[in-house]
Amino acid sequence: MFARPKILEYLQQADDPAVDLAIGAAIPFVDPYLQIELVETILRRNRTEGLLLLPVLFHQVNDTAKARIIAGNSHLFPILRNTIRSPETQTRINSLQIIRKCSNPRLAYLAGIAIHDGASRIRGDAALTLRDMAEQHLANMAQTTAILQDASQADGGLAATVVATMRMVNEERRFLLDALRDAVSSFESHHRTEIVEAAVLFAEELEDALFQGGALLRGKISHAMFEVIGERLLPHHAPFVYVSLAYPEFRKRVATKLATSRDSEFFAEFIRSAWIARDPRIQKHLGVIRSLEWLGDGFEPAFTLPPEIAEMAPAWILALGIPVDQKVAILTNFLMIDAPGANRAAAWALTRIDTPASTLALQQALDHEVTAVREMAEREVQFRSRGNRRLRHRTVDGRPLEWSRLLDAAGLSEDFEDIWQNFERIDVPQAHAAGRLAVQFVPGFSMMLRSRLVDPSPVQRVRALQLVMTLRLASQFNREIFNLCNDRIIEVRVAAIRALGQIGDLTSRRILERAIVQDAASVQAAAIDALGRLGNAVNVDLVVPLLDDEDAAVRAAAVRLLLRRHVNKAAGALMAMLADSRLEHRCNALSIVDQLRLTTLLPYVKDMAISDPDPRIMRSAQQVLRRLHKFKSAAEKVSPVAAGTEEAR
């Protein structure tokens, strides 16, 4: 037990400035427990002479005393303005440590002063301080916002508190942004990437500093930004990604990173931050995002996004440049989830896409469990049917009737670029009847389409193949399609393999059979589906071994083809997929049941809708179950009529 010096009582009561100097001089030499008391004495006396000594002695006190100094940082605000400019390097280091540990944005300007210090260690500590302040501010702001959103008071008395709190948070943010803006503008003098790392978090507010400086400075900052981001996009990078789309030197690199990212947390924040894209400079460039591996077929995003984000997602998807058919498939999945807000948003988004696929999706929503979705789908389907009936009577002079109807129904002109940009509007039956006439009546069609089939961009090659399939022109471009079946990009090979299903000659069949046994899983699945479209001339023995394939898409394609060929093993494989422990296999099995309208499996689907361990599969099974019941009821209504006709005969 240490005896407490009696002189402390006198020092605590004396009112002489020399007392603070005496206490400060004693701090490095007393026991740790006395250091704490002496620090508290100086803070309690709150005299400039004593407070000036705390940053000077900070490195000489124990951790508990340091924590006490940091806790009393409000007393040190005017003091730190002086000590951050001290001629002693250690004092400046100590001052920065105090600023960094208390992480008060109101002190950010002091770290901004230190970023210009002559000592490299001071500059490094200042950069780290600003970065930590930025991260801590965002974390505190998110927590404060969540608390205020959850708070409620019937008489409205809480409003004043909310306003005062947000005003304080915004003032702190202003101090931090001013310091970061100054630090970014002087990047050429310090070259600290931590400053860029912090500034990227506020890209929408620091756009002028990050993106609009002089050419040399902008080049260095651009390099630093991509160095900070690295290979993986994180949630706090979302504002930067949006703002960078407005600048051509960033746009392509950012779109490439987005295309390959699979981080659900990042995309949840990216969708939450979609308000940034209301800026017309950004909004018009969302179309450069033409591919997102994260979206896939939309099943995973629809069922994993939080409800409030899922409700924002359809409008965000609508603004992207991904293929229209993919948008429709993804939005259809958002109609399936148990979230009425997201269901309504998805239905509205589908009304903004005027293609046969979107019309079919809206027709499937006519029996949706959400009333608003049903009503929206019903009005839109009726409107489109009236428009289609009206357009079918229009003709173009000197053109075949079926060609005129195709153009009018899709709202297209005899211009290649118009057809290239909007061919998703073309109705499939009309394309089958008149698509071949595009070569005859669209000027330069063959030449321009061939140039797109060999375009350096994989996205362009895939789109060209999709246009070929839509207009049923695969036979006229068979040489280019055969070459694309060996393309180095898997997505291009998949599209080319699908196109072979429209050619059907011996060469096509051989390429498809080779792809089934030699290529990647997605290409194998496409090859099986393409073989299924060639009629009965299929080597079933090649497909039967794939009934147990590890890839769900390959296995599902094999089951689908062999069920249509009445191969008994396929039925057993489908039952095994429905009971498989892997989510993807059960999902694909449900899709097969839905596509082939296998009402005999109603009991199994009903059981999955009630007791499947994954809520996403339960929800999908409920949708399939509803459609199977509807199809079965329609079939039962038709059967008696058919029976009566047979008796009459």
Image (spheres, grey):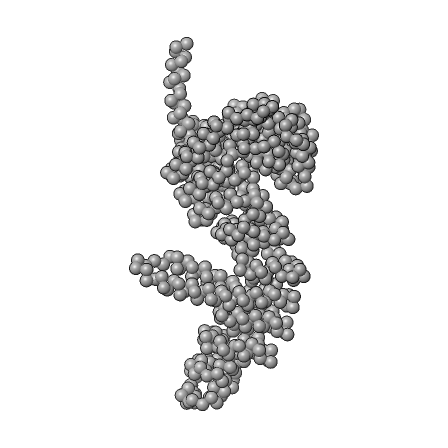
Quadrant of the frame with the C terminus: top left
Q: Residue furthest front?
A: 397
| Position of residue 452 in the picture relative to residue 361 (left or right) | right
In this orientation, does residue 589 appear? no
Quadrant of the frame with the N terminus: bottom left
Q: Residue furthest top?
A: 649
In this orientation, does residue 157 appear? yes
285 or 333, which is in the foreground?
Answer: 285
Is residue 350 placed above or below 441 in the rendered structure? Answer: below
403 or 465, which is in the foreground?
Answer: 403
Label total for image: 0
299 or 5, which is in the foreground?
Answer: 299
> Residue drawn 46% across and 44% down?
303
> Residue drawn 66% across and 24% down?
506
Is residue 272 placed above or below 594 in the rendered structure? Answer: below
Q: Residue furthest left?
A: 155
Residue 440 in the image: state x and y as whole percent.
Answer: 65, 26
> Residue drawn 61% across and 73% down?
117
| Position of residue 273 in the picture relative to residue 188 (left or right) | left
- Quarter of the image for residue 618 reads top left
Residue 623 in the image: state x and y as whole percent.
Answer: 42, 35
> Residue drawn 30% across and 58% down?
154
| Position of residue 415 in the picture relative to residue 169 (left or right) | right
Residue 372 in the image: state x and y as whole percent.
Answer: 38, 39
Residue 88 in the image: state x and y as whole percent.
Answer: 59, 80
